Amino acid sequence: MQVNNNATSAFMQQIRRRISILERPLTTARGDGKSYIYSNFNPRYTQYAITILRTYYNFCVPYKTRDGRNMTPAQRLGIAQKQFKIEDIVYFK
């Protein structure tokens, strides 16, 4: 059995890069402290952003499988029959 955690690592990297409120604080140019310019004041919005990204990642973004087909993670699990567009999800089509 060949198993790895590449898909999980890729998803975690997507979260860190695409949701700016989860970025680490920046060090100021003077070096006197950290700047929290992207900090989130309400954790509920972070949860919403992660849920939207997870849905987009699982239903809209295709990856090449071992047999050469382009499928989304939801298609690989048998949850979805097709690749969705973001408009399909937002407008419940």
Image (cartoon, rainbow, N blue to C red):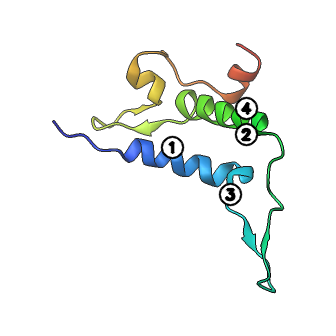
Q: Secondary structure at mark 1?
A: helix
Q: Position of residue 18 (x, y in %)?
A: 66, 50
Pair 1/4: label in front: 4
Q: Earlier in the sequence, mark 1 or mark 4?
A: 1
Q: In this image, 32 relative to 55: left or right?
A: right
Between the residue at mark 4 and the residue at mark 2, the CA separation in whole angstroms equals 5 Å
Between the residue at mark 3 and the residue at mark 4, the CA separation in whole angstroms equals 16 Å
Between the residue at mark 1 and the residue at mark 4, the CA separation in whole angstroms equals 16 Å
Q: Which is more toward the observer, 9 or 39?
A: 39
Residue, disc 3: 23
Pair 3/1: label in front: 3
Q: Quadrant of the N terminus?
A: top left
Q: Secondary structure at mark 4?
A: helix
State the residue at coordinates (70%, 34%): 47
Q: Residue furthest bottom?
A: 30
Q: Position of residue 64 (x, y in %)?
A: 39, 39
The residue carrying pointer 1 sits among few (fewer than 14), some (14 to 19) or many (20 or more) residues within 10 Å by Cα, namely some
Q: Earlier in the sequence, mark 3 or mark 4?
A: 3
Pair 2/1: label in front: 2
Residue, disc 2: 46
Three-letter amino acid code of the residue under disc 3: Glu
Between the residue at mark 2 and the residue at mark 1, the CA separation in whole angstroms equals 16 Å
Q: Position of residue 31 (x, y in %)?
A: 76, 84
State the residue at coordinates (69%, 29%): 86
Evaluate if marks 2 and 1 touch, with contact meaning CB atoms under 8 Å apart: no
Q: Earlier in the sequence, mark 3 or mark 1?
A: 1
The residue carrying pointer 3 sits among few (fewer than 14), some (14 to 19) or many (20 or more) residues within 10 Å by Cα, namely some
Three-letter amino acid code of the residue under disc 4: Tyr
Q: Earlier in the sequence, mark 2 or mark 3?
A: 3
Residue, disc 4: 48
Residue, disc 1: 11
